[in-house]
Every structure is written in structure tokens, then in C-alpha cells.
Image (tube, rainbow, N blue to C red):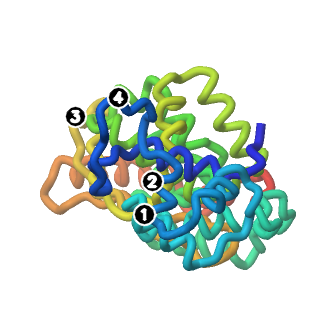
Amino acid sequence: MVSSSPLGDYLRARRAALQPADVGLTALPGRRVEGLRRDEVARLAGISQEYYLRLEQGRDRQPSEQVLFALTRAMKLDNAAVAYMRRLVEFQAGGSRADDPRRLTEEMDRSLGSMLEQWAQTPAYIVDRNQTVVMSNPLAAALLPGILEPGISVPIAVFGSAWREMDRDWEETARRTVASLRFNSDPDDRELQRIVGVLAMRDPDFRRLWARHEAHPHYVSPARLTLQGFGLLDFTRQTLLIPGHRRHVLTVLHAEADTVAADAVRALLSAEVNTRAGAGERIRPRDAAIA
């Protein structure tokens, strides 16, 4: 079920995640509230308690930039939180909607596919705002077969048993995946709701992380993956936002020279050259509509 106030949900979750000491307040004995109280947040932000209550309840759906920055300072949030709250305000005002029927144009498809094809020696793939793979190059598909291929949901894969077993830093990967999923997606996107519903039903770890309401884009991080036949591979996972209203994200897995990961990439590349010709034919967008 979609909340009537996504911003209110976010503020409540962030407030609950803080302790008085985190923001320079002293907690008196017998305190019953978990996290900060509404009046404490309002006082730190320099706004009235009544107005803050209206924000959490969704009765004021368009707070000013000044209010958003004040709340960010009060709850020790970062610039990503400001950007995320701006999008929630836009959503509440009826702006960004995930059901927009616009699709990637053929020209954009060719451009992105050509770009991935040029990176023949680097695993690379593109996901949409819900982290469903839109397109990938042959090396990415060979590195993680059945995962980094068009139409696959990365969040569902991350919370699956196979990914848990191969990822040495699974907890951090899962947290980062959930935070970036929330940051990039739209609350009323039906595909987002499907993904969240599936994972919430089957996985307590997902329910725990989703309830935290963390919302951050991902930029760069290590990726330590144990793959059959190669052992432990150390990559650097770099993401880049593709300009446009779709909020598609390009991810590159970079292996340092003279490492086991680099050897694995060369072996996979050699296998691809020997067994499958025409790499460009397989760099294609998924067949489903892309908002």
C-alpha cells in the first residue's frame, strides 16, 4: 500500500534512527521515546512543533527549500537526503510519476549499446530506477550469468541465496542496494511495489533494511565476489548516472592490472570470443517498456 505521505514516512524513520546524544541533546532518565521526539526535531530545525507534525502527517505537502535544509541540519543528514526529500515533495505535489509511458528511443538504445560494446574488456551494465537490468555487455553477462542480463532485478538477485554465497561483503552490498533503490525510485511505481512486496514477503533482512528508510545514491565501492573456477575476485564497482528523466544508472566493474580478477576477466573474454560472435547483437535493451 502506498503511503499518503512518503516525506512523512521518511522523516519519522530518520527521527527514530537518532538518539539525543547524536544531535547534542541530553536524554533525561525515564525517557520512553525511541529516537528523537517531534518537538526536539522541530526545535533543532527552528520550526514550530505544529508545523513539523503537519509535515509528518502529510497535511503540508510542499515545504520550502529552507525547511528541507533546516530538517537536514537538525537530523544530521547529507546532501543526498536533501535531493531525496526534494523528489518526495515533487512526488507529493503530483510531479514525477513512474507510470509515464515514455520509452527509450531507438537512437538512445543504439548509443548506449554502442558505448557498452566499446568496453569489451570491462564488465558493464545499465539498470533503470528500480535496478532492473536494461542492457549489459557480454562480459558482464558472462561474469554473473543469469544476473547481469536484461530483465533481471538486481535487488531480488542480491537477496537471493546465490549472491549471498558469493559476496564477501553481502551485508554492505544489501544495505547499499536498498538505499539506492529507495533513492532512485518513485514511491508509486508499480514495479517498485512489486519488487518490495516480493522481497518483504520472503526476506527478513530486506524488511529490516527497507524499514530504515535510508536513501543514498551509490558512487564507488569494492566488490569482492567468490566465483566458481576463479576464487575470490576484487573489483571496484563504479556507478554513473545517465542524464535524463529515467534516472538510469551505468555500473562498471573494474579489475586492477595483475590481479586474479583481471585474469578472470581475460579468461571470460577469451571464452566469449571463442564461443559467441557478434557481441553487439547481445547488447540490447530488455523487451519490456522502460519508463
**In the image, 87: left or right of 260?**
right
The disc, 3 or 4, on the residue closer to the chain's N-terminal end is: 4
Q: Which amino acid lies under the numbered mark 2 shown in the image of this protein?
A: Glu
Q: Which residue is mark 2?
A: 40
The residue under label 1 is 44
Q: Is residue 14 above or below residue 92?
A: above
Q: Measure the alpha-carbon separation of dots 1 and 2.
A: 6 Å
Which of the marked residues, 1 or 3, is nearer the chain's N terminus? 1
- Whether 66 is drawn above or below 91: the answer is below
User: Alpha carbon of mark 3 to alpha carbon of mark 4: how far?
Assistant: 53 Å
Amino acid identity at mark 1: Leu
> Mark 3 touching mark 2, by CB under 8 A?
no
Q: Could you tell me how many numbered marks the image carries? A: 4
Foreground mark, 1 or 3, reads 1
Q: Nearer the viewer, residue 77 or 237?
A: 77
Pick whichever, 26 or 150, lies toward us: 26
- Dot 1 falls on a residue whose secondary structure is helix
Q: Nearer the viewer, residue 185 or 80?
A: 80
Q: Does 130 sit above or below residue 71?
A: above
- Residue at 51 percent of width and 53 percent of height: 39
Rendering coords of residue 108 (x, y %): 69, 76
| Label whose residue precedes the other's in the sequence (2 or 4) | 4
Residue 121 can be seen, yes or no? no
Rendered image: mark on residue 231:
3
The reply to whether residue 5 is in sight is: yes
Residue 290 horizontal/vertical position (percent): 75, 59
What quarter of the picture does the N terminus occupy? Answer: top right
Mark nearer the N terminus (4 vs 1): 4
Res 30 label: 4
Residue 105 % position (x, y): 77, 74
